Amino acid sequence: MNNQNRDCLCKKTSIGGQAVIEGVMMKGPLKTVLAVRNTFTKEITVEDVPSKPASQRNKFLRLPLVRGVVGFVDSLRTGYKTLMRSSELSGMLEIEEEEDKEKKLEKALKKAERKAKRNGQPIPDRETVQAQLEEKEKSKENSKGMEVFMNILMAISGVLGVCLAVVLFMVLPTLIFNGIKGISTDALENYRTLIEGGMKIVILIVYLLLVSQTQYIKRLFKYHGAEHKTIFCYEKGLPLTVENVRKQIRFHPRCGTSFMFLMIVVGIVFSLLVQQLFPWLTNSAAVWVIIKILMIPLFCGVGYELIKFCGRHDNLLTRIIAAPGLWMQRITTKEPDDDMIEVAIASMNPVIPENGEDQI
């Protein structure tokens, strides 16, 4: 955050958000709201998102470190739910379905043509094949097991996503380090945690740079920028208008990108400590990976507390802590279009409490 924006902040808010497909989800102290622009009608749909944080059910879940893990799990659950809902409201599912139908039709046409030539029959026209294909699709949709199948497919996708993260950030750095150590000296073992941690940071940056080149992710990152700008505009006490929001910066210290980076840094520190206390744990790659996985809740809890601390205070220490994450946001946030800012404002207004309960 530059000095101009820092000096003129009138308040700090606990309101946070998340960019979704063609929209923004904002979470306030009393409610969570999703706003999405439909790609066909261009209208903005605003709806409440039912969500009750687990921390409200038990005092233990609100304890420092514990609340970070609970909050992270809640954020993942709510984020996934709103992401799926935004794909429906935006019309993206319809676009993807149309593209899939066109691919299936072309494939069916080629198959019907080959079959007709093989049997010496007339080649069916496009309309006939399309009608046959639609009939098959209807019979599939009427199947009672289709909904169950889709739910299972979504669950498998989530599991595969977690597995990919574990492989990229836990397994891959360990395997690469072991390969390097195999052609080097054993003295390199003393620097295992630092080298693996550096590789995690590089993997994260490269991954974000690669995915940011896709069309959908580019727009998602623009909505991410709109979310941050809108929160900054509110914190400065300015009316939430497109003109006012557009002037704000897009880098915010309480961002999920900063949280991810902090988790890696915290992981490096604690892994280094464990390695120094129990050096024998690194003798087996499998054991070392399992240890790092088991420590993820600790990394998450400490990272959350650091983000919370940076959100409440503004001094040299917090600027140093927040700096790497703010730099990373140059990748994960982009300057939004005015219509994206309108969506972010639409999601922000309903979550602002009248009694100032959101102020830190």
Image (cartoon, helix red, strand yellow):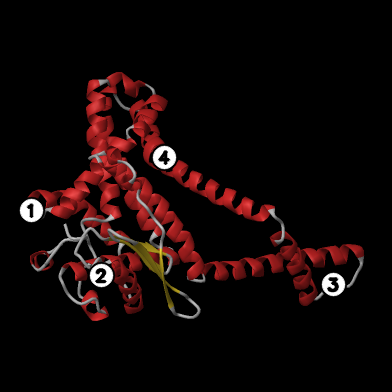
Secondary structure, mark 1, is: loop
For label 1, the residue is 315
For label 3, the residue is 123
The quadrant of the picture occupied by the N terminus is bottom left
Secondary structure, mark 4, is: helix
Q: CA distance from mark 2 to mark 4?
A: 33 Å
Q: CA distance from mark 1 to mark 2?
A: 23 Å
Specify whether 281 is left or right of 158.
left
Q: Residue at x 36, y 66 (%)?
A: 24
Quadrant of the rendered image containing residue 302: top left
Sequence-earlier tag: 3 or 1: 3
Could you say where residue 156 lies in the image, as x and y percent from the top left?
A: 54, 46
Q: CA distance from mark 1 to mark 4?
A: 35 Å
Residue type at numbered disc 3: Ile
Q: Residue at x 15, y 70 (%)?
A: 236
Residue type at numbered disc 1: Asn
Residue type at numbered disc 2: Thr
For label 2, the residue is 230
Sequence-earlier tag: 4 or 3: 3
Q: CA distance from mark 2 to mark 3?
A: 58 Å
